[in-house]
Image (spheres, grey):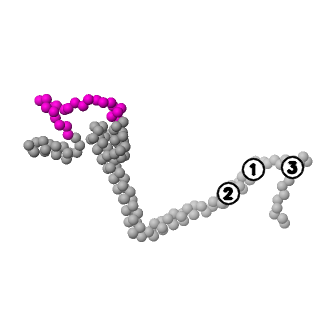
Amino acid sequence: MNDETVIQEPTAQQETKTFTQADVDRIVADRLSRERAKYEGFEDLKAKAAKYDEAQEAAKTDLQRAQDQANSFKAQLEALQNEVNTRNARDKVAAETGIPASLLTGATEEECQAQAAALTKWRGDQPKYPALNDKGEVVRQTGGATRDQFADWFSQNLSK
């Protein structure tokens, strides 16, 4: 027997073959069963892969687990340090320029300074009047950290 299939083009003498609904259903069912047979063991393979991953995790040494945890903590620490550096840069530029730190969105001091300069230019020159107390004396304005405010108060009141 020869497994080769000979395809003949229909001639004018041959009739076109028509299929009944039962023939179409049978053909589709055969095709679906062949396709499903291809992926028959897929769920078993997924389960085996999950077990393998669990075995790999269990096989890790304590040192490897500690290194993984240390790397995770290191990433968290770097993120927190970046946040603190950004906040410090914004606070510093805000204290220098008088622009509220909440308006500054830059991550570095240079970016914040550029933003502050743009905001100052946009705002325009506004006269800055000195703060006066009830007696008409100029009051020195303090700002910044509590430590700086205490140092200013101490130098004004106790160093005389």
**Image location (x, y in percent) of residue 36:** 65, 58
Q: Residue 14 got which mark?
A: none
Q: Is residue 120 magenta?
A: yes
Mark 3 or mark 1, earlier in chain: 3
Q: Which residue is mark 1?
A: 24
Residue at 85 percent across and 51 percent down: it is: 9
Q: Nearer the viewer, mark 3 or mark 1?
A: 3
Disc number placed over residue 10 in the picture, else none: 3
What is the quadrant of residue 140 in the picture?
top left
- Asked which secondary structure carries label 3, the reply is loop
Q: Are marks 2 and 1 in contact (CB under 8 Å)?
A: no
Q: Would you say residue 143 is visible in this rendering?
A: yes
In the image, residue 122 sits, relative to residue 35, either above or below, namely above
Report whether 129 appears left or right of 19: left
Give the SS element for disc 2: helix
Percent across and percent down for residue 41 are 61, 63
N-terminal of the two: label 2 or label 3? 3
Q: Main secondary structure of the magenta part?
A: loop
- 124 drawn magenta: yes
Q: Amino acid at mark 3?
A: Pro
Read off the magenta span. 119-142
Mark 2 or mark 1: whose residue is earlier in sequence: 1
Secondary structure of residue under mark 1: helix
